[in-house]
């Protein structure tokens, strides 16, 4: 049943090739159907834990490959994120005319299919296949419609992430070979494998390489700022809003349960790397001039906190991580949308040339402010809940870790207020004096994004309830294997 | 003197060596192809001989395989050579250096 | 919506919450504190946080101050902001502020307090940068927000420690538990105090408050004098039980408060911007309150919060009235003689000045007197003497401000003089109400000797005693009180004469900026603390950003990644030499390979 979430965009993408003229409408309708379907699953979802709406088909029997998929609370949250953001990203891209629309929107739909597949797969190889499938469309999107120097930058992105994925594949195959009888890639079989501490250490780093590059965690991040900057806006939003969550999801679903013992030693190093990234990226973000770059670096900083919190393997850390994934997805897409709107109007992203936009475009300024506040994690916005829980998780890992990770509270305010100030406040100049305000399409897009920013800051418990039991079960698996 | 398996081995060794020497020393691409055929057939001969010797038909099955592959290979190879000849009026393998690194 | 409607709605809802606050206060008075939980905000593992409110004696006092003074300032703003294009926005922000501030004081646990805490910080940011076209104002707003965030981080980590220690963030669970002093509690207290430093502008996080005067004057009155900046005092008073358990933290609070009080008062002596003087005065008065907290006199600190809210709001609104009349001019060197033109403003401002200077029986006298007596017993003689000197400094800079602004002859331009007028009723009415409060507010907490002599009661102590307990100290001798009273009146009288002589009779004026030398220059440049922070924090972090980007990111981290790319490229370059293009060479290689395999086969 849930596989429809993959099939619908996949088939729509194919149909796009036949009906090229209707590319936009087919893409939007398909993504809206997916959104409706996700809400349907949400309404039918039983949050007592376990996988639902799934199926387990035998794929290649002799190799123990299953087409096994399903939805639990953790997956459901990410499906929500993916399928809420996809239509927004699609509609957000209408402000600009892209060459070869059919291909462009087809690739976005393929992304949607691949991402849904990644989050739903319960078979190691299936997961890997979907993982790699997502890389292709996003690479094409960035490499075809990207900006200056796109080939070099996107090639680096492709090869870098691909190399990481191969290490993950090695780790997966190693665990697969340890399964008894006919080997199996099935998640339960893989979870059941008992590995020695040394083996787990290798497995840990194998997975971590893939996930850390995808997120990215310091110091595996160097592809990210360039790629985000050079990609077309929808590509950047897909990458930052949804795709990097694949890495975090991988930590939760695959890395931590498969190598729980390694969390104790290797995990500590990984947590400290993530924390180092928080501060490092934030300090660099303060000095950037390009709007997209600031947000790109801020993304590294935020993701560092999510990764650190999750790897503490505490309830607060994991719940906070889940919540922050949603919050970050929504906020970062909102920020990139705003940047895209500014760029469409003025053709620049250099902050030193902007200023005073709040006067000609007050609605944009207000919506931007709300999204920015979510990103700064002001209480009663969605960013705060996750950050609070994550820092709480990191605090249980170590007080100094929490103090250093907590610097994000300060630095994030510094760079976010800086971009807000330099773009929206101050005197208008010749360029910005006549900036048109948001049109209705843009207004509603941003307004829709602002709803969860405020609502889940005020009342986060419904989201926490969705994944609560599954996270508890996962933590039990981690604790038992220890 | 009965013809023993040893004779076949010697014969095919000689044939194979002739083929190798031809491939190494000649520069005419057609001769080269012929020498490759010679090597393949040396092996075929050996396999057929051993197949009879051990009374195991699988060797002969392989011979057929090899013959089919060799035929296909020659067909493709000759086609390429024809094209090369049309282009360069020569089939000297020294000409085939366009793919050098 | 029209402006008058916006003003009415904006002020009306605050009036409504004031009435409700009064009702809540009466209920607390009758039947004690009550709690109300709206919904479960968060439940993760053992962390359970209710979106709950607690109204007890302490919070209802704060609610009254916030909504009461808030209402007056709303009314004032209707007049003050009348010609501003952002009128609607201003009232929206101001109401948001009242909401956040009420959340802060009404929360039943530390997290709800933190919501309000950051919320008021946000409103403060929005309102300081209200006139967003001015870049400097924007910078001041950012500075305020970021400095507050530094404190917030302390508070946040303090909350984590607290939760770690007590398993709850509810006031009831934390403060009801019997506490013995421990290292953890000291840490929590210090971390909370870091939060309070940010919000209540204490050394080292005070420099944002004077800059915050960039905002419209009603904002300075409401947020940066009467309510928000006292949130730190509220936090410490609320956590009084914790602080009592940690003498070390109390010492820290006291000394930081003392240092701030004195330091800011000296700066206040040489400021020439009417609002800057009041800003440093606020910082200094907040220092007084922290000294009171540091010696364990929690109710005294709250008493001073109350009276300070009255007279400081009054002074700021008065200065707003002056600025309004002067057409935006804030430099007191260009004022003078305004008494004639602004009679109501002058009278109320004078009352405010006398109240803050501590003339009996105005409000400031009682609260400051109580702080001094408590310090005498709880803080040692050094702290007491320093605090007395600071009180004298307070009187000096306030009298200086008063005389330069209202007495003497007018020193502005002809145009300005022509423009001078008393403010409209919506502005003067709040001034009058606040002036009355500044006169009578002190009787909320009369000293002991008055209790005996006049049969009055220290209402506030009895009232707040249900929530926080002051550190006990020996009963104050009447002799001590009389001495203090007599000395303070005498000193104030002499000072008033001296200041008057200096600035009015001799017509000495503060020198223009460029002629300042020596200590005057040092003071008027605020000891160059801003420059110092800029040099040791702001610039290094900025250059670190550039350094990391240019010298770590590009050559090392990205260099390593690109290095792998280059490695494969250059190895390809080497290996491709094997691809000679010479067919015989390949064939030779093949044959040699076959021979090697044969040979190996034979050997093995």
Image (cartoon, coloured by chain):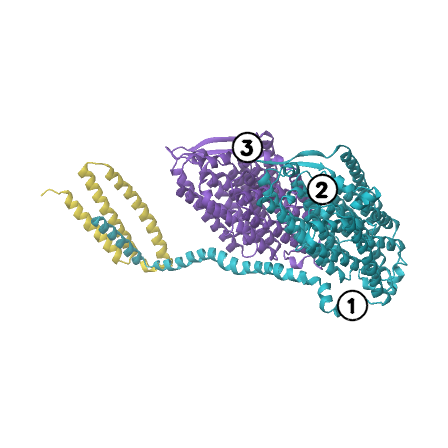
Chain colours: A purple, B yellow, C cyan
Q: Secondary structure at mark 3?
A: helix
Q: Position of residue C170 (x, y in %)?
A: 64, 37
- The residue under label 1 is C511
Measured in 3D between alpha carbons, the distance from the residue under mark 3 to the one under mark 2, in whole angstroms, is: 35 Å
Q: Position of residue A297 (x, y in %)?
A: 57, 52
Q: Secondary structure at mark 2?
A: helix
Asked if labels 3 and 2 share a chain, the reply is: no
Q: Is residue B32 above or below residue C460?
A: below
Residue situated in front as seen by the camera: C39 or A400? A400
Q: Residues within 10 Å of mark 1 (few under 14, many from 20)?
A: few
Measured in 3D between alpha carbons, the distance from the residue under mark 3 to the one under mark 1, in whole angstroms, is: 71 Å
Residue situated in front as seen by the camera: C30 or A443? C30
Q: Earlier in the sequence, mark 1 or mark 2?
A: 2
Q: Residues within 10 Å of mark 2 (few under 14, many from 20)?
A: many
Q: Residues within 10 Å of mark 3 (few under 14, many from 20)?
A: some
- Quick check: can you spot residue A424? no
Q: Check residue A469 in the rendering and tell me which mark sits there, or answer none.
A: 3
Q: Position of residue C266 (x, y in %)?
A: 73, 60
Q: Secondary structure at mark 1?
A: loop
* C485 on left or right of C51: right
- The residue under label 2 is C105
Residue situated in front as seen by the camera: C12 or C485? C485
């Amino acid at each position: 049943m849930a596989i429809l979430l993959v099939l619908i965009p996949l088939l729509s993408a194919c149909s796009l090739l036949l009906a090229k003229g209707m590319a936009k409408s087919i893409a939007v309708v398909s993504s809206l159907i997916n959104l409706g379907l996700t809400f349907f699953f949400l309404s039918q979802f039983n949050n007592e834990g376990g996988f639902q709406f799934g199926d387990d088909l035998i794929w290649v029997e002799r190799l123990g490959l299953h087409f096994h998929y399903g939805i639990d609370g953790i997956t459901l949250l990410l499906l929500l994120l993916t399928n809420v953001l996809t239509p927004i990203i699609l509609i957000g891209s209408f402000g600009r005319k892209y060459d070869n629309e059919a291909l462009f929107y087809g690739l976005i739909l393929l992304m949607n299919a691949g991402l849904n597949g990644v989050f739903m797969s319960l078979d190691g190889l299936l997961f890997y296949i979907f993982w790699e499938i997502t890389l292709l469309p996003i690479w094409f999107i960035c490499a075809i419609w990207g900006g200056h120097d796109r080939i070099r930058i996107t090639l680096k992105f492709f090869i870098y992430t691909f190399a990481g994925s191969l290490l993950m594949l090695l780790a997966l195959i190693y665990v697969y070979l340890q399964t008894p009888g006919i080997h199996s890639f099935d998640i339960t079989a893989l979870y059941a494998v008992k590995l020695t501490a040394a083996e787990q250490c290798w497995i840990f780093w194998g997975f971590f390489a893939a996930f850390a590059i995808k997120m990215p965690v310091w110091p595996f991040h160097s592809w990210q700022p360039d790629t985000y900057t050079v990609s077309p806006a929808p590509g950047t939003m897909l990458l930052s809003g949804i795709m990097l969550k694949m890495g975090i999801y991988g930590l939760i679903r695959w890395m931590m349960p498969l190598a729980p013992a390694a969390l104790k030693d290797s995990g500590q190093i990984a947590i400290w790397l993530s924390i180092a990234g928080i501060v490092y990226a934030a300090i660099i973000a303060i000095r950037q001039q390009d709007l997209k770059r600031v947000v790109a670096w801020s993304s590294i900083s935020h993701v560092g906190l999510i990764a650190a919190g999750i790897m503490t393997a505490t309830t607060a850390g994991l719940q906070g991580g889940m919540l922050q994934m949603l919050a970050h997805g929504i906020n970062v897409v909102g920020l990139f949308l705003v940047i895209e709107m500014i760029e469409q109007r003025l053709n620049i992203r250099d902050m030193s040339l902007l200023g005073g936009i709040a006067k000609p475009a007050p609605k944009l300024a207000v919506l931007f402010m709300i999204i920015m506040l979510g990103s700064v994690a002001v209480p009663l916005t969605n960013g705060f809940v996750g950050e609070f829980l994550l820092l709480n998780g990191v605090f249980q890992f170590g007080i100094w870790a929490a103090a250093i990770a907590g610097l994000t509270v300060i630095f994030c305010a510094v760079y976010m207020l800086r971009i807000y100030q330099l773009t929206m406040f101050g005197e208008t100049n010749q360029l910005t004096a006549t900036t048109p305000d948001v049109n209705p399409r843009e207004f509603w897009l941003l307004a829709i994004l602002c709803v969860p920013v405020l609502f889940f800051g005020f009342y986060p418990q419904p989201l926490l309830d969705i994944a609560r039991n599954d996270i508890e079960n996962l933590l039990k698996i981690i604790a038992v294997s220890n | 003197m009965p013809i023993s398996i040893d004779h076949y081995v010697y014969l095919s060794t000689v044939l194979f060596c002739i083929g190798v020497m031809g491939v190494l020393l000649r520069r005419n691409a057609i001769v080269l192809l012929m020498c490759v055929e010679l090597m393949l057939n040396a092996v075929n001969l050996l396999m057929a001989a051993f197949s009879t010797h051990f009374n195991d038909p699988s060797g002969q099955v392989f011979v057929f395989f090899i013959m089919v592959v060799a035929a296909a290979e020659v067909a493709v190879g000759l086609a390429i050579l024809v094209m090369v000849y049309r282009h360069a009026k020569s089939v000297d393998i020294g000409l085939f250096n366009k793919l050098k690194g | 919506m029209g402006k008058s409607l916006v003003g009415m709605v904006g002020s009306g809802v605050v009036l409504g919450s004031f009435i409700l606050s009064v009702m809540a206060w009466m209920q607390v008075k009758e039947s004690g504190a009550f709690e109300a939980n709206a919904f479960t905000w968060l439940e993760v593992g053992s962390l359970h946080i209710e979106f709950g409110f607690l109204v007890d004696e302490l919070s209802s006092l704060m609610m009254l101050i916030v909504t009461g003074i808030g209402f007056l300032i709303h009314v004032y703003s209707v007049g003050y902001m009348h010609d501003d294009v952002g009128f609607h926005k201003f009232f929206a922000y101001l109401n948001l502020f009242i909401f956040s501030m009420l959340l802060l004081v009404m929360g039943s646990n530390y997290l709800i307090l933190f919501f309000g805490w950051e919320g008021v910080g946000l409103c403060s940011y929005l309102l300081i940068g209200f006139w967003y076209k001015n870049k400097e104002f924007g910078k001041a707003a950012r500075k305020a927000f970021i400095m507050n965030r530094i404190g917030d981080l302390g508070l946040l980590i303090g909350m984590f420690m607290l939760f770690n220690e007590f398993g709850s963030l509810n006031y009831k669970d934390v403060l009801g538990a019997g506490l013995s002093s421990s290292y953890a509690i000291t840490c929590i207290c210090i971390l909370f105090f870091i939060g309070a430093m940010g919000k209540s502008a204490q050394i080292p996080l005070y420099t944002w408050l004077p800059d915050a005067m960039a905002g419209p004057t009603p904002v300075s009155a409401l947020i940066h004098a009467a309510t928000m900046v006292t949130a730190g005092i509220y936090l410490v008073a609320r956590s009084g039980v914790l602080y009592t358990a940690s003498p070390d933290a109390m010492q820290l609070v006291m000394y930081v408060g003392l240092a701030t009080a004195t330091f800011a008062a000296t700066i206040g002596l040489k400021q020439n911007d009417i609002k800057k003087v009041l800003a440093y005065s606020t910082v200094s008065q907040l220092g007084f309150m922290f000294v009171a907290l540091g010696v364990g006199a929690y109710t005294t600190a709250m008493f001073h919060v109350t009276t300070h809210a009255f007279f400081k709001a009054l002074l700021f609104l008065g200065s707003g009235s002056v600025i309004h009349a002067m057409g935006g001019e804030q430099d007191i060197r260009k004022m003078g003689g305004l008494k004639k033109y602004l009679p109501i403003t002058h009278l109320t401002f004078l009352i405010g000045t006398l109240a803050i200077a501590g003339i009996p029986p105005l409000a400031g006298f009682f609260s400051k007197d109580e702080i001094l007596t408590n310090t005498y017993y709880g803080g040692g003689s050094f702290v007491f003497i320093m605090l007395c000197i600071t009180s004298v400094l307070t009187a000096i800079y306030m009298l200086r401000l008063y005389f330069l602004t209202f007495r003497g002859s007018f020193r502005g331009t002809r145009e300005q003089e022509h423009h001078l007028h008393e403010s409209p009723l919506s502005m003067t009415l709040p001034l009058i109400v606040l002036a009355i409060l500044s006169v009578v507010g002190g009787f909320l907490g009369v000293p002991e000797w008055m209790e005996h002599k006049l049969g009055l009661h220290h209402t506030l102590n009895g009232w707040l005693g249900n929530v926080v307990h002051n550190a006990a100290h020996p009963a104050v001798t009447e002799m001590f009180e009389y001495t203090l009273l007599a000395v303070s009146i005498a000193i104030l009288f002499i000072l008033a004469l001296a200041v008057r002589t200096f600035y009015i009779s001799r017509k000495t004026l503060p020198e223009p900026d460029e002629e300042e030398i020596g200590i005057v220059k040092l003071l008027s440049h605020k000891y160059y603390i801003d420059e110092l922070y800029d040099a040791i924090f702001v610039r290094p972090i900025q250059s670190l950003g550039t350094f990391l980007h240019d010298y770590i990111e590009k050559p090392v981290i990205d260099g390593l990644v690109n290095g792998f790319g280059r490695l494969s490229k250059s190895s390809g370059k080497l290996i491709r030499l094997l691809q000679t293009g010479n067919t015989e060479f390949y064939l030779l290689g093949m044959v040699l390979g076959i021979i090697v395999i044969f040979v190996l086969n034979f050997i093995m």
